[in-house]
Amino acid sequence: MTSPSPIYHLALRDVHAAAGADFVVLGGWSLPAAYGRGAPAEYEAIRTSAAVIDRSNRSRILVTGTDALDVLKATFAGHVEDLEEGRAMRTARLDEHGAIQDVVLIARTGGIAYLVVGEPPQRADTVAALRREIQADFQAQVEDRTESTCLIGIAGPNAASVVGEHLADALPARIQTLHCVTFQFHGFRGLAIRTSDTGEDGFEFMLAPAVAQHLIETLAPIAPLAGLQATEIARVETAIPAFVPDLEPGLSPAEADLDVLLELAGGAEGRILAGLIVDGDPLPPGTPISLGADGIGELRSCVRSPGLNATIGLGIINSRVAFPGTQLLVGNTPATVVAKPFYRRRT
């Protein structure tokens, strides 16, 4: 009999519980689903002002040393060698068949120091993959910092003003999108990366747990906490795939529709992760998708978007029918293929 997989808890779980969080398990982590105000209010904050999101379930792996770059190049696809100090990039780890095993953000925090932020359920495999690439004569270290640090996000159209007024006034001006920099918050050192997967402006901060708690408490009056329900709606609206549930069936960069975005070789084709408008309520991952009498794929992410007043989803379907306007059935429910993303931030 196999032992059950462990469930990890956020370092600031008690802080979230005190804020009224209800918890749900996803990808091996117990996460706040929503807080006392409810997911609609949290979603509204992401789209109209700013919200704080605890992203500490995402892996944080430090790769350092004079041979760190060689370790990263051997582990991840893409042009990691082009990454300059103070910059960040998104790329993927692929298996021997070219299927995506992890989608990561790599930040070059120093000359020979890199931070790899990846998908929660892929953490152990990515750590092991990095360590396998350390040759006997390499000077390189791989340290898993996921459980000893926090990753706190601030997302929304007002994210920059919130950060500038309440964290560090120089930060918004110093870092552009996909840049990173160390900074001081109330005398403590942290790492800031300008990035977001909500479709809005945003920052993510890697901090010690006590400092992360202070940050959340500092911003509570102006930027409420947002849980998994609200952030999942924003993610799907932006059509950004998550490993669970979108990529776990084993998709190539082309099939995941990430090859151009991540500047990767496409690999296998024939199916694609398409955007769908689904009639009725959200349906579970794995629900079959059909066109006439033919099975053509399956649904993966699916949420009800209050901003769009529609049920939207990402489904893996045959590329030959993945054209906007195509009418399908998801289970027994009518659906329509639409262009991605569902939401694009106004500038």
Image: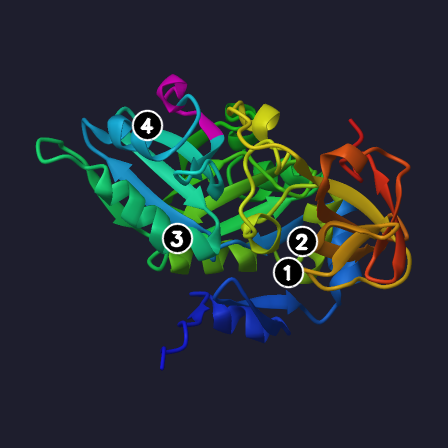
**Between marks 3 and 2, how big is the CA–CA gap?**
21 Å
- SS label for mark 4: helix
Quadrant where the C terminus is found in the figure: top right
**Is 124 situated above or below 22?**
above
Q: Are marks 2 and 1 in contact (CB under 8 Å)?
A: yes
- SS label for mark 3: helix
77 or 327: nearer the viewer: 327
**Between marks 4 and 2, how big is the CA–CA gap?**
31 Å
Q: Look at mark 1 in the image and give the residue it sits on.
A: 228
Q: Amino acid at mark 4?
A: Lys
295 or 266: nearer the viewer: 295
Write down the region rendered in magenta: 80-89
Q: Residue at x 39, y 17 (%)?
A: 82
The tag earlier along the polypeptide, 3 or 1, is: 3
**Between marks 4 and 3, how big is the CA–CA gap?**
18 Å
- SS label for mark 2: helix
| Position in image of residue 250 (x %, y %) | 53, 47
Q: Look at mark 2 in the image and give the residue it sits on.
A: 231
| Position in image of residue 76 (x %, y %) | 38, 33
Left or right of 177 in this view: 80: left
Q: Which mark is residue 72?
A: none
Q: Amino acid at mark 1?
A: Leu
Q: Residue at x 26, y 32 (%)?
A: 71
Q: Look at mark 3 in the image and give the residue it sits on.
A: 123
Res 238 visible: no
Count neighbours of disc 2 (C-alpha within 10 A) and say few if under 14, some if 14 to 19, many if 20 or more. many
The tag earlier along the polypeptide, 4 or 1, is: 4
Q: Is residue 139 magenta?
A: no
